[in-house]
Amino acid sequence: MCDRMMATDPDKRARATRRFERQFDAMERMIPALRRPLTAIRARGWWIVRVPVAIIFILGSFLAVLPVFGVWMLPIGLLLLAVDLEVLRGPISDLIVRARRRLATWRRRG
């Protein structure tokens, strides 16, 4: 039983990573102007920049009462953090899928 669970865990992580990458690709197709920044954000050597910026964005989202800061900073910070933390990739890709579906529904109504 334990061997079977261990075999599915890497598969699950790999699936979550592939789905996360597909969501980035979909965002690039939806908004072509974001292609270059999103590619740069995902570059391997940039973790040293991504993690502190993600933490700053997440902390800045708690200062939503100030004019520049806001709740918009939380999803961006989590997205940046998910690039480096496998644990966040599944939940963040789920949120991206939900947001894309709601945006599509909103566009159809309008």
Image (spheres, rainbow, N blue to C red):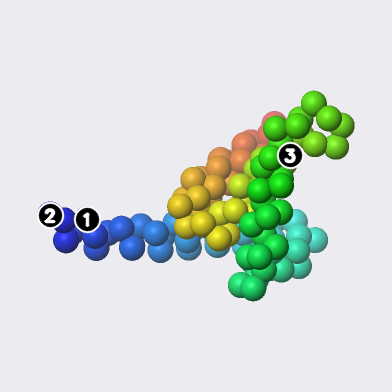
Which residue is identified by label 1?
Answer: 5
Q: Residue at x 76, y 60 (%)?
A: 34
Q: In this view, does 92 lie to the left or right of 67?
A: left
Do callouts 2 and 1 mark residues in contact (Cβ within 8 Å)?
A: yes
Q: Can residue 107 be seen in this view?
A: no
Which residue is identified by label 3?
Answer: 60
| Percent position of residue 75, x then y | 65, 43
Disc 3, SS: helix
Numbered disc total: 3
| Percent position of residue 7, x then y | 24, 63
Tell me the mark number nearer the camera, choosing from 3 and 1: 3
Quote the CA–CA distance across marks 2 and 1: 7 Å
Mark closest to the chain's N terminus, 3 or 1: 1
Nearest to the observer: residue 90 or residue 109? 90
Q: Is residue 51 visible?
A: yes
Answer with the quarter of the image where residue 101 lies: top right
Task: Give amino acid for label 1.
Answer: Met
Tag shown at residue 1: 2
Q: Residues within 10 Å of mark 3 (few under 14, many from 20)?
A: some
Answer with the quarter of the image where residue 47 lies: bottom right
Nearest to the observer: residue 106 or residue 17? 17
Q: Residues within 10 Å of mark 1 (few under 14, many from 20)?
A: few
